[in-house]
Amino acid sequence: MESNFKRTLILENYEKPFHRGLLKDSTYLRENKNNSSCIDNFDIELKIEDGIIKDIRFDGEACAIATSSMSISISKLIGKSKEEALNIIENYEKMINEEEYDEDLLEELTAYEDIYKQPARKKCATLGILGIKDLINKSK
Amino acid sequence: MNYKNDFPMLEKDIVYFDNGATTLKPKCVIDAICDYYTNYTSNAHRGDYKLSVKASNEYENVREKVKDLINAKNKDEIVFTSGSTESLNLVINGYFKNHLNKGDEVLITKSEHASNILPWYELENEIGIKVKYIPLTENHTVTIENLKMVVTDKTKVISIAHVTNVIGDVRPIKEIISYAHEKGILVVIDGAQSVGHTKVDVTSLDIDFLAFSAHKMLGPTGVGVLYGKYELLDEVKPLKYGGGMNIAFTSPKEIEYKDLPFRLEAGTQNIAGVIGFGKAIDYINKVGIDNIEETCDELKEYIVKKLKTLKNVKVYNENVEGSTIAFNINGIFAQDTAIYLDKYNICVRSGSHCAKKLEDELGIKNTCRISIYFYNTKEDADKLIEILDNDKILEESLGV
């Protein structure tokens, strides 16, 4: 992905994140995720029906990388089955950790392919999506 | 004066504005630590041989230096700890836990560091004291009038920072202590941000207990001080028992402990660290405390003035004394600003700065903090301002 495009995508998703604001609906699973070493902090809600991710919401304060990756992850994962979602998340983690991964599966999430160059930011780039992963696993 | 040649870290082409977290160390401090490990490693207060006598003497000389620095009456009122956090925990759990009763009130503020809040919260949970807050003014400062509003017959202790670590305001502790003592209230001062930055005279201020850290005043990490008036300190129950603090023991009923300060320094102490701390005090005395304070104040004023010429910068504490500047760039998360500055080797802190109750007061959780020490220069400030004068900070912070 070209650098300018990555920056624009990240900034758009930081400034106007997708599905920000919690519903506090009892049919949603809920979890707080924060980075103890920095100041990122999210509450995340997830709704799963018949094994399909119906909705994900979040709220909280975090840096541009954490907020934008949360937003992009949400738009990427809604509508996926639990298995598909976990596969995407696994590939995303591999990308962040500089392992072999399936680029086609990640699409826009490859905006974070260079985050490994800033080790302190790895936690920012994974905070939201790992929260979603926890919630999917909780729903089993 | 240019101090940069004395600080090896400043040869690294960095602008270091995180002095509130820890200061850099001059070469004389590093050399003194190295000298102990290289030339006279031995335990203090233990051996009968020359090396141990030298280690003991060097260690005890620093106690004398600390006594002089804060103008204590007696060197036995100086207890070495691992830092301000341990000092505060020691006085809260070693003294106040045994001298306060259920319903007694302690006054703190919402801009205290975690180490001056959490031990009190735990004490509230444990023995039922009540933690209350002195209301802050709209500039987030403490005044004697605000203090008087919350003092009651049940107030037994006031525990506050002399200088706070986010806002950097200097509290009127002389007035506070004098008022408190009229009411029979004891005062604990967290001096982590003040000792070595401004004159702290425990005798003229009449401070009951004072906690501070070596590493925030040119010394090594892992060393701190608890000062207490002798008769109060003598009632602090040790939190650690072991070697170095006892005279004799034969059974639980027959134990004899040493006098102050050794009774509160169980186990082998951070001998190298304390010796390094001594050199830090020498260096500070050489520069002069008034000179340090003046240099920091001038530079703060200079930076605030320049920051205000930049659009989109909000400074939260321009109207308070002290050498700390809390700011944000509109629309940019504090951490992104700090990461952006780091690309240019400018070190600032972002976050809540361990003062998590302060968000109640500021209405904002996270800020960037510039904290100044005397080796910072106008050139450092100019570089900071030049780098902040950029419309693309957020984009450039992303690193993609």
Image (cartoon, coloured by chain):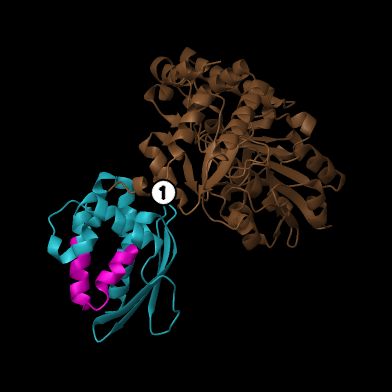
| Front one among B330 and B10 | B330
Q: In the shown orientation, is residue B172 left or right of residue B367?
A: right
| Front one among B395 and B81 | B395
Q: Is residue A79 magenta?
A: yes
Q: In the shown orientation, is residue A48 left or right of residue A1?
A: right
Q: How many marks?
A: 1
Q: Which quadrant of the view contains residue A33?
A: bottom left
| Front one among A96 and B33 | A96
The residue under the point 34% across, 62% down is A13
Residue that label 1 marks: B336
- The magenta span reads A70-91
| Front one among B187 and B295 | B295
* Above or below, comparing residue B261 to residue B284 in the picture: below
Chain B's colour?
brown
Chain A's colour?
cyan
Residue extending farthest bottom: A50
The residue under the point 60% across, 15% down is B286
